[in-house]
Amino acid sequence: MEKNVKNSDMKSSVNGGVVDVYGEDSATIEHSITPWSLSVSSGYSLLRDPRYNKGLAFSEKERDTHYLRGLLPPAVVDQNLQEKRLINNIRQYQYPLQKYMALTELQERNERLFYKLLIDHVEELLPIVYTPTVGEACQKYGSIFRRPQGLFISLKERGKILDVLKNWPERNIQVIVVTDGERILGLGDLGCQGMGIPVGKLALYTALGGVRPSACLPVTIDVGTNNEKLLNDEFYIGLKQKRATGQEYRDLLHEFMSAVKQNYGENVLIQFEDFANHHAFELLAKYRDSHLVFNDDIQGTAAVVLAGLVSAQKLTNSPLAEHTFLFLGAGEAGTGIAELIALYISKQMNASVEESRKKIWLVDSKGLIVNSRKESLQAFKKPWAHEHEPDNDLLGAIKAIKPNVLIGSAGIGRSFTKEVIEAMSSINERPLIMALSNPTTQSECTAEEAYTWSKGRAIFASGSPFDPVEYEGSVFVSTQANNAYIFPGFGLGLVISGAVRVHDDMLLAAADALAGQVSKENYEKGMIYPSFSSIRKISAHIAANVATKAYELGLAGRLPRPKEIVKCAESSMYSPTYRIYR
C-alpha cells in the first residue's frame, strides 16, 4: 500500500518517480485528489485538461464541486464502459491511419482513458500507436497535424535552447526521446515530421513501462531535410532548407545536450531515435560517458534480438557460442546487435570480445565484409572484417559461411528469397531466421514464406507483425522482435535506480530478463518471445534486472537499494485508473 504525501518538499514519489507535489500518485485509488494545473481546474477548463478530464465518468458530487453541471449530458458512466465504447468505435475504422488519428485525439482529450485503452488492448493497438502505422503517420504528419505534442527545436533556436526547454510546462522530466528525423524507420528522411516517433515511443514508455506521462518529453531537432518532396510540400511543418551538417549540426546537438542536463539534471534519460548511422554512432560515443544516453536503434534492438537468440537455445539445443551468425545489413542496428552478441558469447565462453566476433559475419550493400575491403570501410564496420574471399551475393555468403542464424536489418524487402531460406534449411535442422526490417513492406520475408520454404522447420521472428501460419496441419505463431519488449522496462529500471550512466552489462541483464519470461506454452507454438499481453509484468522483471545491475556496477544514485526490486518496479508504475476529485 502506498503512503500519503506528508509535505510538498519530498524529492521523489513512489519508489523513485518524479516529484509528486500534489499527492496524485502517492494517494491510493480510494483517496481523493485535487485536479491542479496552474490553479485548481474546474468547469470548462477541467473538461479540456487531458490530464484530469474524465468525460461522462465525473460523479454527481464532482459535477457539483467542480462546476460541471450543464457542461455534460446527465448520464454518469464508469471508465470501463467508456473504454468498451471507444474500442468498438476504433474497430469500425477501415484504415490503420484513421485509428491512429482517433487514438491521438483521445490522448489529447483524456490521458488516463487513452492509456487504459492501450494497456488493456496492447496487442491490438501496438501496431497502430507504433510500427508499422506510425511510419505512415510520419509521412503524412503535415496533413494530419492538429495540435503540437512535444518540443520542436530548430536552427532558429540556436543559443536559446535552454529557454525553449523552460517553455515546456513540466519541470520534472525523467525520459526524453529525441530524433532529428533523418532516418525514420525504413522510410528515410522525414525531417520535422519524424515527431511521430518520439511521441509514439513515449506513449509506450507509459503504457508498457509505467513511466508517468508528465515525466516524458518528446523532442524533434529540426536541422532541415534533404527530402525534396517535403521541401516542395506546402503543408510541410518544418524548416524548408537542406540539412545542416558538420560543425553547425554538432554545435546545435551539443547545446541541446548541455541544456537538458542543466535543466533536468544528471538522471534524465535521453534516448536517441532514428538518427542516420553516422550521427547515431557519433552521438552515442560522444555522450555515453557524460550523460545518461541510450540509442534504441542500436542498443534496444540489440537487446531484444539477443533475448530471442538466448531463448531459442531451448529449441536449437545448442548454446550461442556454437552458432555462426550472418547479417544482411551492417548499419546501426546490424552492428549493434552483432556487438552485443559478441559480448554475450565472450562472457559465456570466458573469451575476448575480439575472439567472439569471429563467429559473426556481416553483408552490406557491397557484399560480405572481409579484410580485403578494410581500407574503404566505415569505422564501425571494421571490427567485422574477417579473412575470407569476397562475395557480393547473400546466397553465396550463406553457402560459404554456413551460418546457423540469419538476421536481416538492411530494410530491403523480400531479400530472403526462397533460395536463401532453402539454403539455410539445407545447412540446419532448425534454421533461425530473423527478418527485422520494418515496416512490413521492408521485411526481408514474411512468416508464411519462412515456414513454407523451410518446410516448417524455421525458428522465425520478425520486426513487423505477421498472422499465425498454418503449414501441413500445424499452426506456427511467429513473434515480433519488437523493441517495445525492452526499452520501456529498461528505462523504468534506470529511473527506479537513479542510474547516471548506461552500461553494456545492463543490456545483457535486460536480454536475460526477457528471455526468462518465455513460457513452455510459448515454445510449443514456436515462439521465442513471450506473449505481449503480459508486457507490464515483463517490463517489471526487465526493470528489476537493469536496476540490480546498476547497483552492482555502482551506477545507481537512488539509495538505499530496495530489498525487493521487482515489487519496487511494479509499485512505481503509472496507473491509468481514474482518481476521485475533492
Image (spheres, grey):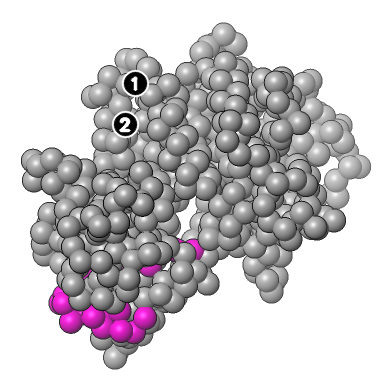
For the C terminus, give its image quadrant.
top right
Q: Is residue 470 above or below residue 105?
A: below
What is the magenta range? 417-438
For the N terminus, give its image quadrant.
top left
Amino acid found under the numbered disc labelled 2 = His
Q: Dot 1, crowdedness within 10 Å: few (<14), some or many (≥20)?
A: many
**What is the x, y in percent for residue 348?**
12, 45
Element type at mark 2: loop
Residue drawn where x is 49% and y is 69% of the image: 442
Q: Disc number at residue 503?
A: 2
Q: Is residue 217 left or right of residue 68?
A: left
**What is the x, y in percent for residue 487?**
43, 43
Residue drawn where x is 16% and y is 77% of the image: 427
What is the CA distance from the residue labelled 1 to the residue labelled 2? 11 Å
Q: Which one is earlier in the sequence, the residue at label 1 or at label 2?
A: 2
Image marks 1 and 2: residues in contact by CB distance under 8 Å: no
Amino acid found under the numbered disc labelled 1 = Ala
Comparing labels 1 and 2, the label whose residue is closer to the camera: 2
Residue 141 visible in this rendered orientation of the protein: yes
Q: Is residue 13 above or below residue 44?
A: above
**What is the x, y in percent for residue 34?**
70, 24
